[in-house]
Image (cartoon, rainbow, N blue to C red):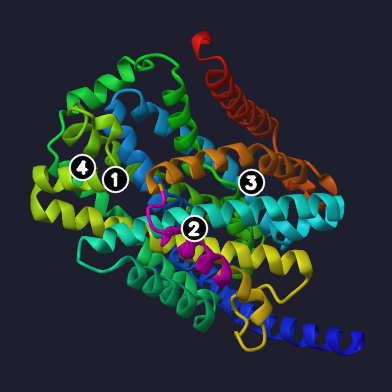
Amino acid sequence: MIQQQAVYVRSIDSEDAAIRAKDQARIDTLRQKRGWLSRILLGYVLIGPGVLVMIADNDAGGVITYSQTGATYGIGFFIPALILSGIIAYIVQEMTVRLGAVTRRGHAELIWGRYGAFWGWFSLVDLVLANILTLITEFIGITLGLSVFGVPHWLSALLAISLDAVVLLVLRYYTWERVSLWIAAGNLIFIPLAFMAHPHWSVVADAFAHWQVPGGFTPAFVFIILANFGTTIAPWMLFFQQSAVVDKGLTVKDIRHGQMDTAVGTVAMVAVALALVILTGTVVHGMNGASNLSIQQILTVIGQRLGNTGETLFALGMVEAGTISMIALTASTSWAMGEAFHWPKSINMPARRAWKFYLPGILSAVLAASIVLIPNAPLGFLNLTVQVIASIFMPAALLFLVLLLNDRHIMGAHVNRKWQNVSAVVIVALLVGLNAVYGLSVVMPKLF
């Protein structure tokens, strides 16, 4: 039986390798050609994991969090803060590019192989739990967005799960990536919305000149700071991008393009996040009770201030944000489970032969949708809480990443440089410090 299973796995791996070799041959052919057109085509073929992970990070939960942030605190503090968080996200995600390209192994597979079953289980449970919680926020955004068009929540959830299943089960990696990139492009819809709000750009510029905490370090402010960091850097991003780099078949010579891919994605992510804060900071902030408005109420205010076009575009943006992130999160779960348990672990595999690989991702989406459909669930509070939980889980995930990047046995000349290690330590210290401050603010509110 064991021998038969080994033969079966080898046959699946050989099929996966054949498809990946075909994709790699396309890249090698373009790399050998000269001329600007070939350079552009090479860049187009290589782009993918970095843009997807960053755009998917602007998920429905992120849209809600940034919108409530702008409504509550306005433009001031969070404009520079979001740019800083974008730099942090790039530093972290660039490490996954090198790790995946050098080792050609996914994040979960490396942790299990390098640090054993205990830490493997720790990281896997951490990831799967965080992914399910984050998927809840995606379905919140999808159902609320489609409700603007009169679609009932149960039908919205069903349509979303069906789309996710079709994209994941039917398409092979290269096509899956291209389709996902086209969906991700819809995230940019929030940028023209910010211009439609006619913000005072002098106020935006002044945010850099006078960067200060609005109202002091209250528990509510620290909570929303954690929520913003949680939606900018999250554990699933590490697993997703590294596995995508491996499934795409990128190698050491593709690291530079992978870094450029991640940089482009980072710029897009930050631009959209800023647009959302500027939008709600302009049209919602300052209203009576703005800090207590739900995303449904914020959407209504946007409709009142920007008209039906503004409300429609914002609703479509929430649907897109939830959809692209759902696709990325389910793939992340499937990749991690496949790597941990040595199942087939590639989107190149047909569903009938690799059902164990695809099943965890689809089931996680079904579970998250079921929770969202519970009557009278506190969706707004749940969304912010999920982002905070992501920021709590992140330090442990980041520590594993840094340890692997400093392992010369597996990384060779591509180990972290000193400034990258210092940056990682500062990021971990920042997250731990913010979590500690929040804990103290809850236990001893008079301290602040």
Q: Amino acid at mark 4?
A: Ala
Q: Earlier in the sequence, mark 1 or mark 2?
A: 2
Q: Residues within 10 Å of mark 3 (few under 14, many from 20)?
A: many
Image side of residue 365 versus residue 124, left or right: left
Image side of residue 215 versus residue 74, left or right: right
Q: Label 1's element?
A: helix
Magenta span: chief secondary structure:
helix
- The residue lying toward the viewer, choosing from 6 and 32, is 6
Image location (x, y in percent) of residue 62: 40, 46
Q: Residues within 10 Å of mark 2 (few under 14, many from 20)?
A: many
Circle 1 residue: 295
Labelled disc at residue 135: 2
Question: Nearer the viewer's eye, disc 2 or disc 3?
Answer: 2
Circle 3 residue: 95
Q: Earlier in the sequence, mark 3 or mark 4?
A: 3
Circle 4 residue: 194
Answer yes or no: is residue 342 visible.
yes
Q: Amino acid at mark 1?
A: Ile
Q: Amino acid at mark 2?
A: Leu
- Identify the magenta region: 362-377
- Residue in the picture at 59% in, 51% down: 130
Task: Measure how far apart labels 2 and 3 are at the Cα level.
Answer: 25 Å
The answer to the question of whether label 1 and label 2 lie on touching residues, with beta carbons closer than 8 A, is: no
Image location (x, y in percent) of residue 148: 21, 60
Task: Measure how far apart labels 1 and 3 are at the Cα level.
Answer: 34 Å
Q: Specify whether residue 366 is painted magenta.
A: yes
Q: Amino acid at mark 3?
A: Met
- The residue lying toward the viewer, choosing from 180 and 410, is 180
